[in-house]
Amino acid sequence: MKTIGLIGGMSWQSTIPYYRIINETVQARLGGLHSARCILWSFDFDEIERLQAAGDWEAATDRMTAAGRALAGAGAQLLAICTNTMHRMADEVEAAAGVPLVHIADATAAAVRATGCRRVGLLGTRFTMEQDFYRGRLARRGGLEVLVPDDAGRTAVHGIIYDELCAGLVREDSRRRFAAIIAQLAERGAEGVILGCTEIGLLVGPQDACLPLFDTTQIHARAVAEAALQGAWQD
């Protein structure tokens, strides 16, 4: 079993399910008292959010690559960034650490394709919904057609993520707002919706949506565990 290096704390609210799902997956596969070998680097998210808001992606990349190198130095044999937005510098983190990184968009695209869906809505931070690092990867590598909400919808989703979910606040009016945005994506032809922020699953589930949902936290965490388990029986 490979040792997993988790880059989390962005926010800590969604890092908790990563740890749980990874360990549940390992135990389900290996049985008994088995659990995952993990090392966690947890950021103070206030620092990262300020860099995001300022558009200082160079400084954010410096911090992320430093975390990747630290985890590799501590013995991590593969990496996972426990957030969608900070995959903006996934290639740089992987190169700096010198160990493989399980990319959240690739795992998600594979899960979407396995259901037969090809046109999907994408909900996440403005950075994830609007910038090419994520949407483009889903299209170019994943073969998906990606739809995002209109500007008002993107503003609402982004605000709910940062102002509420990252602070652990789950509000019924925000759940209804997400459900309405998902319905609008369905009207535009979406066959499913990617919950492209690791906090969104704290707010909405299948019962709240008129379309199949692809929760990136669950998908990514399971993919990370499976990557760590390759060859586990020989370890």
Image (cartoon, helix red, strand yellow):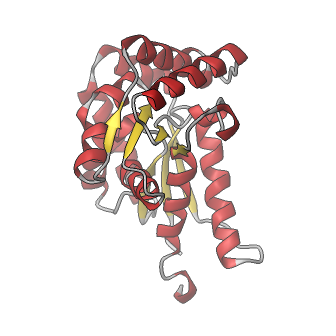
**In this figure, what is the number of numbered marks?**
0
| Front-lying residue, 148 or 46 | 148
Q: Position of residue 117 (x, y in %)?
A: 42, 51
| Front-lying residue, 219 or 32 | 219
Among all residues in the image, which is located at the extreme bottom?
Answer: 234
Above or below, 26 relative to 194:
below
Q: Position of residue 4 (x, y in %)?
A: 50, 61
Q: Position of residue 48 (x, y in %)?
A: 42, 26
Q: Is residue 119 visible?
A: yes
Above or below, 1 relative to 78:
below
Q: Is residue 124 visible?
A: no
Q: In this image, 137 relative to 23: left or right?
A: left
Residue positioned 77% across, 77% down in the render:
32
Above or below, 172 relative to 233:
above
Q: In this image, 73 relative to 20: left or right?
A: left
| Front-lying residue, 188 or 26 | 188
Q: Quadrant of residue 212?
A: top right
Among all residues in the image, which is located at the extreme right?
Answer: 32
Residue positioned 54% across, 36% down in the render:
9
Residue positioned 28% across, 52% down in the render:
143
Above or below, 5 relative to 11:
below
Q: Position of residue 122 (x, y in %)?
A: 42, 34
Which quadrant holds the C terminus?
bottom right
| Front-lying residue, 148 or 164 | 148
